[in-house]
Amino acid sequence: MCIVCQTISVGAAALTGILPISTPVPEVVAPSLTAVSQSAIQPTSIGGTACKKTGQVRNTSAGSFQCTNVGNRRVWRRSAIATTTTTTTTTTTTTTTTTTVPTLRSAVYEDIIKRAAFARTQLSKAAFEFRIAPSISATRAQELREAILWAFIPWENQTTGAGLRVVVVDEQGGGGEDFFRANMPAGGGNCPGAPGGGGRPYVGPTQSGYRGFGCWNGDGDHVLLMGFGSGVKLSSISNFIHHEITHLAQAGIYLRRPNGTGLPCFLGEGEATLYGGVLGDGQAGGETSHQLGRKLARELASENSLRTDSDWLTYLKLRDPRDQTCNQSNFSYFVGQLYVEKLYSDFGIEKIATWKSRLPEQDWRVPFQQVFGVSPSQWYSTSLIPYIRESCGC
């Protein structure tokens, strides 16, 4: 059995300086103030000149003047009568609509992106095994390895993936089921076609040209099946790759139990949806799946008459631990992202990693309270439920 490990290094591109060509700048001649006549600068005043009728008012460009008796003469004097000039100013307000990610989510997304960028500058420690179908060309196989490893590197501070297996088939080339069966571990479990297994059967090629799902054998070992059609551009499905590789990392951290039973319903798919969106498509990707979560939360509230915090608490507790209702209506995916966003925002990645490292040993609620200092029900009531209800307006 050959374990394939690959280090992905990012080379810096060399920049070549280009010297600018000197271009003469035309001389700008400033206008001379001495060329402007004084009369053009200051209007002529009639003050002091003779006038005929006392009290007469005359408005000129130099101001307002009134005919005034001075001794035995009548002359124009600057008027004390105020001349009111009304100026109307029209203000045009331009409203620019900018789509921004609110602070809580933005901080979570940015933290995930920064940590992934740093991890990708380090030497890869990935130790999971690749089994790639021979019908896939060598060039394509290398491309697939690099894309899968690139998605896994951000998780290497929590798991190397040792003992895990990724089986890659040609989604549109046929023979996928036989290759998958030949390369999964024995021992039953829920893997398709495994000896003694009770899992779903492998089905034929998908219309999308790609798929991914994980299964466990009787000993809790995890296998991730990934299928890629030869015509599928990996850059266009980065979200999908990061989503599925998050599940592989979860298997290395805490899912070494049949089908992840005994875990909180929202954690597995919610975390994979969050990482798939954010690392696959950036902050915009995270926001897109968040909006789907809001929509599904509204549907859940309507369909299950969730009108109060107490209703929501009962509903959430019924789905923990994970059971067959967990994936209904995809709420574990997108509403699950809301769950994980708040979890990450409240406690941070380091504490969450500590909590997850203890999940294989005991019921998830026990280390939750030990690590976070609050019970799951208390956290639901004081933090998660208000966040979900505020997000969906329900």
Image (cartoon, rainbow, N blue to C red):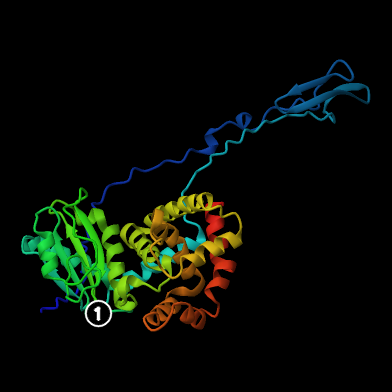
Q: Position of residue 116 (x, y in %)?
A: 33, 70
Q: Position of residue 392 (x, y in %)?
A: 52, 53
Q: Nearer the viewer, residue 80 or 368?
A: 368
Q: Position of residue 30 (x, y in %)?
A: 46, 41
The amino acid type found where label 1 is placed reads Asp
Q: Nearer the viewer, residue 112 or 76?
A: 112
Q: Is residue 14 visible?
A: no
Vertical arrangement, residue 187 with respect to residue 96, above or below: below
Residue 228 at what x, y percent from top left?
17, 57
Q: Residue furthest right?
A: 71
> To which residue does mark 1 refer?
219
User: Image quadrant for the N terminus?
Assistant: bottom left
Q: Please determine whether, in this image, residue 252 is positioned above or below residue 231.
A: below
Q: Quadrant of residue 77?
A: top right
Residue at figure coordinates x 26%, y 61% from the top left: 241
Q: Is residue 272 visible?
A: yes
Which one is in front, 13 or 248? 248
- Drawn side of residue 111 relative to residue 252, left or right: right
**Relative to 72, 81 lies left or right:** left
Of 70 and 189, the residue lying toward us: 189
